[in-house]
Image (cartoon, rainbow, N blue to C red):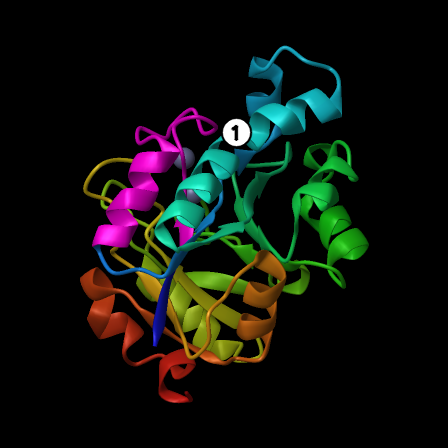
Amino acid sequence: MYRYELHLHTSETSACGHVPAVEQIRTYHRLGYDGVCVTDHLHNVYLKTLGADDWRACMDAYLTGYRLAKAEGERLGMDVILGAELRFPENNSDYLVYGIDEQWLYGHPWITSLDHKAFFDRFGDEVLIIHAHPYRNCDLVFWDSVHGMEIANANPRHDSRNELALAYYRAHPGMYATAGSDAHRIGDEGRAALLSKTRIPDSYRLKEVITARDYRLACEPFANIILESEAIRNV
Ligand SMILES: [Zn+2]
Ligand SMILES: [Zn+2]
């Protein structure tokens, strides 16, 4: 099985990220991962810090971490996949978005000014929207406007209340389940993974693997939760 990280930040792009992109990739390579999906934070508070009103300039800056990771991945033979962690002005919920490329980001200015419902209505047929750590900041899960949820977020500095996410997922088995390390700092790496029978060279393929339910999840710190999950048992 090939091993992929689905939730990772770089210090070049994410203000809360402490590890440069190249270092993240080298660490994951050393840990035996075949690839990572870079999901840097994308929201208006971050974009404001760039001091640019021009969406193109914003995306040039936003993609810095991903591009550095990608180049290092190519050097080491790892798949580096583009994702994003979106937040809308309405609240502090975060959404992992898969099934995109650079052109998609450049081509959809100020998606960050929508709300979760408008985003889902407009792009739900196109991209995969996963509610990140759905119980970390709130009790609300917008089940009608996400495709799935991160049932295990392994970040050690947050209580993501994964058991509630798993319970919700069990009650809504039509959803897709993911797991991620949410890697921001040294020591966060490699605590969760998606395991795939095939290589996943890009974000479109990642979306296909998840929607085909052709994967398993691993998350050692929450192994007792995850191992019971149907996302695991069925494959
Ligand atoms: Zn963060
Ligand atoms: Zn994150």
Residue 82 vertical position relative to residue 99 in the rendered view, above or below? above
Residue 172 vertical position relative to residue 122 in the rendered view, above or below? below
Residue 219 belongs to the span the image colors magenta: no
- Quarter of the rendered structure image containing ligand 2: top left
Q: Residue extending furthest top?
A: 51
Residue 63 vertical position relative to residue 206 in the rendered view, above or below? above
Quadrant where the image shows the C terminus: bottom left
Q: Name the residue at 77% across, 48% down.
A: 118
- Counting labels gives 1
Residue 112 in the image: state x and y as whole percent: 68, 34
Residue 89 occupies quadrant: top right
Q: Residues within 10 Å of mark 1 (few under 14, many from 20)?
A: some
Quadrant where the image shows the N terminus: bottom left
Residue 103 in the image: state x and y as whole percent: 73, 43
Residue 126 vertical position relative to residue 26 in the rendered view, above or below? below
Q: Give the range drawn in magenta.
A: 5-30
**Residue 189 can be seen, yes or no:** no
- Whether ligand 1 has any atom under 8 Å from the Cβ at mark 1 is answered as no
Q: Name the residue at 70% across, 40% down.
A: 105
User: Along the line of sight, which residue is nearer the eye, 231 or 67?
Assistant: 67
Residue 156 in the image: state x and y as whole percent: 23, 46
**Residue 3 can be seen, yes or no:** yes
Tell whether 232 sits left or right of 207: left
Residue hosting label 1: 64
Q: Residue extending furthest bottom?
A: 234
Residue 13 belongs to the span the image colors magenta: yes
Q: Name the residue at 50% across, 62% down.
A: 149
Q: Which amino acid does label 1 sit on?
A: Thr
Residue 125 in the image: state x and y as whole percent: 76, 63
Q: Name the residue at 66% across, 23% down.
A: 58
User: Along the line of sight, which residue is nearer the eye, 74 or 62?
Assistant: 74
- Label 1 sits on a secondary structure element that is helix
